[in-house]
Amino acid sequence: MTFTLVQVIVGGLLLGAVYALFSSGLTLVWGMMNVVNFAHGDFVMLGMYVAFVVYTLLGGGPLIGAPLATLLLATLGVIVYFALIRDIMKGPMLAQILGTFGLALLLRYSVFWWFGANFLSLPENLVGGTFDIFGIRLQASRLLAGVVALLVTLGLHLLLTRTTLGSRMLAVAEDATAAQLMGIRPDSMQAIAWAIAAGATGLAGALIATFFYIVPTVGETLGIVAFVTVSLGGFGSVPGALVAGLLIGVIESLSGYLIGAVYKDIVVYTLFLGFLWFRPQGLMGKT
Amino acid sequence: MRRALWLLIALALVIAYPLVFTTPFQQRLGALVLLYAIAASAWNIIGGYAGQVSVGHVVFFGCGAYAAMGAYAHFALSPLVGIPAGIVFAVVIAAVIGRPTLRLSGHYFSMATIAVAELARLIVTNTEYLGAAVGLSGPTVPRNVFDLSFISALPYYYLFLVILIITLGITWWMTKSRMGFYLRAIKDSERAARSLGAPASRIKLYAYMLSAGLTSVAGALYAMMFGFVDPESGLGILISVKILIMAALGGAGLLFGPFVGAAILVPLEEISNSLLGGKGAGLTFVVYGAIIVLIARFQPGGILALINRLWAKRRAKPMEESIAQEASHAS
């Protein structure tokens, strides 16, 4: 019993690290530009399909799939920024929400149209098999995904806080006009932020695809997970997203184990609404 | 005066439509346009006039649909009895969602509405009393006229038309009332409106509750016409999407915008579905997505705002008037 419980918690932490990775992309863009990307979950979905295509066409695992998905999604992020976001950012709220929401539909149903509505999955032993550590059974694919996601999220935090590029991005987030007067191009910084945010979703998607079901509408569920994570962690905070992502992974796994798999989404959504209502600044946010 | 004349002509055309186009497909299409126009007009009150983008309006749609079918399935009553119950459920849910979230900025409201819609769908799918995944059915054979179960789409067409006129009437009355003035002020600048003493949160909440109640009527009518409701048709997020995009395409915040949007998109979807079959469903939403992105990027005011603007230019109105109109459309 206790071993199973520990196993469930470890599983939740590993999944939660992946949640943290793609949520940090959402929180970055949100904090910097005050734009909410309603297509964020669908970016993750695209990353999953990239991994799937890489496997079916080339027989490659996440070693090829993950970098490729990161690169492709980062490119998509930049395109989306210049083609859509840059203009709707200045527009009315309706245009902002409609713009990214329409993008979500466009991506989701293009994939639906091409691949169909079937649930796909990658072979279970694509990344090693299952092994035991201290009596806890672990899937290699989940371990790989969790560890890589954790390291990349930490790396992202360091990038934002310890490098010149990070400081420039924060300067733009603080005050774009002032940053421009200091010789920083807000446009380039925001495009880079979109590249990073979308790249993170691509990586997360390719990692999660090794053990998750793949379906065009998965982006909706994952998008809500990202919103929950960001609202829990505080808008704009990468460390907040990390803590919140891990927490949500554990809560989801535990509720799935204790109450039943059907109810785990219900628990997560309820948690989200509860936070929006009672503590919109998040767990660690300032009032 | 001129406006009233145009309205009468438009109304006459809408009344004449099913008498001119008499095939079942055409009449059904007409009825569906009116039905979606009701739902989109109801959305317009909160999404267009109050500028709060609800992406979860299907919850209210579902309240109406489930109440109407539940009245029949559980109490053997006419589905009509379910309508007031549906309105009550919808208004109460709107109050519960709206009170905390309408205080926050727009994104939060949109996200909360998505989460509530998905939550409702998951809960209903797991609730035996509401038919779980199978859903609830209406009367298969009508016992009397109050079961509102007709084979022809013609009775539905005129019923929906009456309800649409009532919905638009309520919306028009709202825009002319004190609440309408408050809403316009809040949409322009909430902070300014608040500092001048407009009770912004309360007014937005009222608009949301009104919108919810009317949407639930649309849901009840939908369930009556189709004779059943299940989690996908009554609570699927895509219904929210359709409602929202129709209003936005036609012109959010304009009285007849949602009707124009419905009159364009419903035929588009029905025709693409009948041409492409099941495979078309995916493609329809690809097109929907593309349309939404294009509206957001190039014409956030919708088609009607564009037409109005071109119209105003052509008639070379006095300067102040066209400026005032520009301003009201830009917002």
Image (cartoon, rainbow, N blue to C red):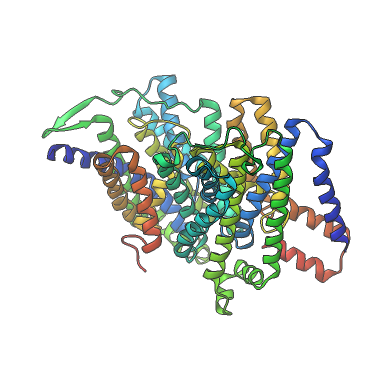
Q: Residue at x 47, y 40 (%)?
A: A42
The answer to which quarter of the image holds residue B222 is top right
Q: Is residue A17 visible?
A: yes
Q: Where is the N terminus of chain B found, in terms of image quarters?
A: bottom right
Q: Is residue A156 left or right of residue B168?
A: left
In-front residue for pair B10/B81: B81
Reply above or below: B196 against A123. Answer: below
Q: Residue at x 34, y 63 (%)?
A: A285
Reply above or below: B163 against B21. Answer: below
In-front residue for pair B154/A203: B154
Reply above or below: A47 against A285. Answer: above
Q: Is residue B293 visible?
A: no
The answer to which quarter of the image holds residue B221 is top right
Image location of residue A204, percent across then percent down: 37, 39
Q: Where is the C terminus of chain B found, in terms of image quarters?
A: bottom right
Q: Is residue B3 left or right of residue B229?
A: right
Image location of residue B180, percent across then percent down: 66, 68
Q: How many marks?
A: 0
Q: Residue at x 78, y 67 (%)?
A: B323
The answer to which quarter of the image holds residue A275 is bottom left
Image location of residue A122, percent across then percent down: 36, 25
Residue reaching furthest to the left: A134
Image location of residue B189, percent across then percent down: 59, 70
Residue reaching furthest to the front: B143
Q: Residue at x 65, y 45 (%)?
A: B36
